[in-house]
């Protein structure tokens, strides 16, 4: 992935999230509040996260336990399948966290050793903040529900968050065209 795309993709995601939060329609609030326990979101997000992770397992080399990739694939596939059945609560939040962590690796790899572009740090800083949030929410997924309840308790909070997300997204979009 190029540094341009690695900066533009988070920029577009932030602008879209900011626009939704600025709009702050009842459907946005209801959808966001239902997200942590949504079965559809579980199937999409956790399914994609498990699939992406299992794909990475199939690409392991000998230096990375590649001699045991079939065993690892079977064990992790069983864990993913059993998670749907045995741990369904807040699995959408964990699925989102898995996807964010896997995507963060691609974004950070694109910025690695790009010393000529100090503006890349706008994207890198955001990615590290999102990594910390994902690790926290993977361990305490009910906090996502609490945060969404707090965010949508007052319309001004959602709009302020929308302005912040949209503004930083626009900044990242501008930065992406400076490489």
Image (tube, rainbow, N blue to C red):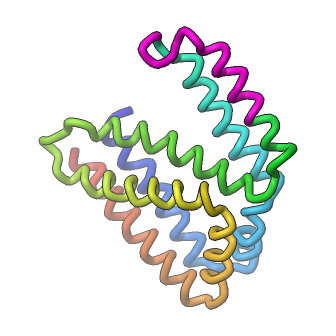
Where residue 102 sits: x, y (%)?
A: 51, 40
Count the numbered circles shown: 0
Q: Which quarter of the figure is the C terminus placed in?
A: top left
- Residue placed furthest toward the right: 85
Q: Residue at x 39, y 53 (%)?
A: 127
Q: Residue at x 44, y 53 (%)?
A: 10
**Helix, strand or loop: magenta stretch:** helix
Q: Which quarter of the figure is the N terminus placed in?
A: top left
In this rendering, the answer to whether 100 lies above or below 145 is: above
Q: Which residues are magenta?
A: 62-79
Q: Residue at x 68, y 29 (%)?
A: 76
In the drawing, does residue 22 fall left or right of residue 148? left
In this rendering, the answer to whether 42 lies above or below 115 is: below
Nearest to the observer: residue 155 or residue 99 = 99
Q: Look at the image and say whether residue 75 sits in the magenta stretch.
A: yes
Q: Look at the image and say whether residue 78 sits in the magenta stretch.
A: yes
- Residue placed furthest toward the left: 116
In this rendering, the answer to whether 24 lies above or below 90 is: below
Where residue 70 sits: x, y (%)?
A: 66, 13
Nearest to the observer: residue 75 or residue 169 = 75
In the drawing, does residue 12 fall left or right of residue 151? left
Where residue 26 sits: x, y (%)?
A: 74, 80
Q: Residue at x 66, y 48 (%)?
A: 95
Nearest to the observer: residue 106 or residue 176 = 106
Q: Which corner quadrant of the image does residue 169 belong to? A: bottom left
Where residue 30 sits: x, y (%)?
A: 76, 74
Q: Which corner quadrant of the image does residue 137 belong to? A: bottom right
In this rendering, the answer to whether 179 lies above or below 74 is: below
């Amino acid at each position: 992935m190029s540094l341009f795309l690695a900066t533009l993709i988070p920029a577009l995601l932030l602008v879209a999230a900011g626009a939704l939060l600025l709009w702050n329609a009842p459907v946005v609030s209801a959808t966001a509040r239902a997200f942590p326990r949504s079965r559809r979101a579980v199937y999409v997000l956790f399914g994609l996260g498990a699939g992406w992770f299992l794909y990475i397992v199939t690409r392991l080399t000998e230096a990375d336990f590649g001699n045991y990739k079939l065993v690892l694939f079977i064990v992790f596939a069983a864990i993913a399948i059993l998670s749907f059945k045995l741990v369904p609560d807040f699995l959408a939040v964990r699925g989102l966290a898995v996807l964010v962590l896997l995507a963060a690796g691609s974004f950070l790899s694109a910025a690695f050793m790009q010393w000529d572009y100090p503006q890349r740090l706008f994207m890198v800083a955001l990615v590290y903040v999102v990594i910390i949030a994902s690790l926290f929410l993977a361990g305490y997924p009910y906090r996502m529900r609490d945060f969404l309840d707090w965010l949508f308790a007052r319309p001004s909070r959602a709009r302020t968050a929308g302005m912040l997300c949209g503004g930083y997204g626009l900044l990242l979009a501008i930065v992406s065209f400076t490489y």
